[in-house]
Amino acid sequence: MEISIGMILSLLLMHFIFDWRLQSREIAENKSKSVKALLHHVKIYGCGLATFTICWQVSILWFVINLFVHFATDYVSSKISSHLYKNKEFTQFWNMIGLDQLIHYATLFGTLALFK
C-alpha cells in the first residue's frame, strides 16, 4: 500500500502529541538520569505508536523497531541535552533537541517506507 498524505499527517501528529505534549516536565527533567522515567516516557510514546500501527495496519516489526530506537535515541540525547542545559549552552541544547527530533522522524518515516 502507498503511503498517503493522511498517513504522513497522522504520524506527524501522533509524534508531536506523544513525544512532546504528553511528556511531563518531571519526565523531561529526569529521563536523562533515571531509566524508570525514560521507560515511562517510552511507554506513553508506545501507546501512540500502537494506535498508529493498528489504525494504519502497519507491521508489528515497524512498531518494535521504532519503540526500541526511540528509547535508544532518547537515552543518548537526553543525557547530552541535560549536560548542555546545566552548562547554559542553550544554542547547543536546542540544536540537540532538534537533532533528537530529526532522528525520530527519519526513523519513523524511513522504517514506514520499508514496512508499510
Image: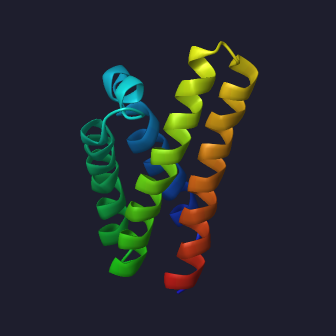
Residue 100 versus residue 36: which sits nearer the camera?
36
Residue 58 versus residue 89: which sits nearer the camera?
89
The total of numbered circles placed on residues is: 0
Q: In this view, does 28 lie above or below 51?
A: above
Q: Is residue 13 visible?
A: no
Residue 101 versus residue 75: which sits nearer the camera?
75
Residue 81 relative to residue 47: left or right: right
Q: Give residue 21's position: percent from left, percent from top.
A: 41, 32
Give residue 87's quadrant in the image: top right
Q: Give residue 38's position: percent from left, percent from top.
A: 33, 41
Q: Which residue is drawn at 28% across and 46% down?
A: 39
Outermost residue to the top = 88
Residue 42 relative to residue 88: left or right: left
Q: Is residue 77 above or below residue 23?
A: below
Give residue 65's quadrant in the image: bottom left
Q: Is residue 28 above or below residue 49?
A: above
Q: Give residue 97's position: percent from left, percent from top.
A: 62, 35
Residue 49 relative to residue 4: left or right: left
Give residue 106's quadrant in the image: bottom right
Q: Which residue is drawn at 42% across and 40% down?
A: 17
Q: Give residue 59's position: percent from left, percent from top.
A: 38, 81
Q: Which residue is drawn at 26% across and 50% down?
A: 43
Q: Residue at x 49, y 83 (%)?
A: 115
Q: How is the image coloured?
A: rainbow
Residue 6 versus residue 104: which sits nearer the camera?
104
Outermost residue to the bottom = 1
Q: Is residue 114 visible?
A: yes
